[in-house]
Image (cartoon, rainbow, N blue to C red):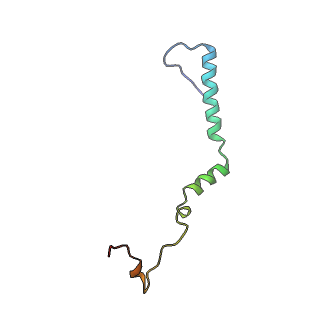
């Protein structure tokens, strides 16, 4: 891992703090669990929203229209 300071003159303590943050974020990004991925998949599943079926066409389907009478 290469880090380059573009502006300023950070102290060794400031540089160490910045490096600790970068390493912690990189470790958190690579440590994804399968449970978290599965929860995201379940959240984006369209079947979660459509829990009941819509009425199917049939002989009395004209009674279930939403046209004003």
- Which residue appears at 60% of the width and 23% of the height? 18
Q: Quadrant of the N terminus?
A: top right
**Quadrant of res 29:** top right
All told, the count of numbered labels is: 0
| Picture coordinates of residue 52, whole percent (x, y) | 54, 70
For the C terminus, the quadrant is bottom left
Extreme residue toward the front, this view: 69
Q: Position of residue 24 (x, y in %)?
A: 64, 32
Residue sitting nearer the eye, 52 or 10: 52
- Left or right of residue 66, residue 15 in this image: right
Depth check, front residue: 45 or 66: 66
Residue ranking furthest to the left: 69
Q: Residue at x 65, y 44 (%)?
A: 32
**Lateral position of residue 68 relative to residue 7, left or right:** left
Identify the residue shown where x is 55% and y is 59%: 45
Residue 22, placed above or below residue 10: below
x, y percent for residue 65: 38, 76
């Amino acid at each position: 891992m290469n880090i380059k300071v573009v502006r300023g003159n950070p102290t060794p303590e400031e540089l160490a703090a910045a490096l600790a943050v970068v390493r912690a974020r990189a470790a958190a990004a690579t440590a994804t669990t399968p449970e978290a991925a599965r929860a995201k998949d379940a959240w984006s599943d369209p079947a979660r929203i459509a829990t009941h079926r819509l009425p199917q066409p049939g002989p009395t389907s004209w009674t279930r229209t939403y046209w004003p009478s």
